[in-house]
Amino acid sequence: MPTSLLINIDVPELQKGIDFYTKALGLRHTRILFDGTVAEMIHDGAAMRIYLLAEGEATVATREPICLRDYNRHWTPVHMDFVVEDLQTSIESALAA
């Protein structure tokens, strides 16, 4: 079972993303992670963290098969990650469902 839920948002430029989500949505920037490519953001009324990921258009989104990010009609830069304690058990539960 998931132990936590993370929301990730791809942004082409990290500082511009921080500025936008701070001003537009009232999120608070808490720290920079992973060699300056990820910004952790929080909302004081929400129970989850939001991460801005420095991922521009046409960067590699998946390795197998290779898929490039394309922010046109059917691509969203917003995705959720379910953090689990036991990956194998979670995979088996998902396959059984």
Image (cartoon, helix red, strand yellow):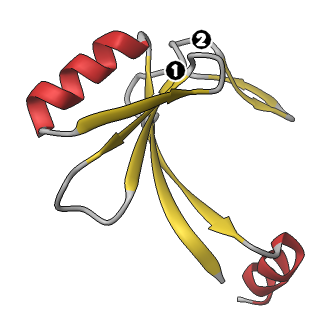
Q: Is residue 62 left or right of residue 71?
A: right
* Helix, strand or loop at mark 2: loop
Position of 10 compared to 65: left or right?
A: left
Which quadrant: the C terminus?
bottom right
Mark 1 surroundings: few (<14), some (14-19) or many (≥20) residues within 10 A: some
Q: Earlier in the sequence, mark 2 or mark 1?
A: 2
Please say if 96 is above or below 10: below
| Vertical order, 95 against 58 (above or below) | below
Residue at image mark 2: 58
Task: Say which of 65 and 56 sits in front.
Answer: 56
Residue name at image x 64 percent, y 64 percent: 83
Q: Which residue is mark 1?
A: 70
Residue 41, percent from left and from top: 34, 39
**Mark 2 and 1 residues: CB-CB less than 8 Å, in contact?**
yes
Q: Quadrant of the N terminus?
A: bottom right
Name the residue at the front extreme. 30
Amino acid type for the residue under numbered disc 1: Asp
Which image quarter: residue 88? bottom right
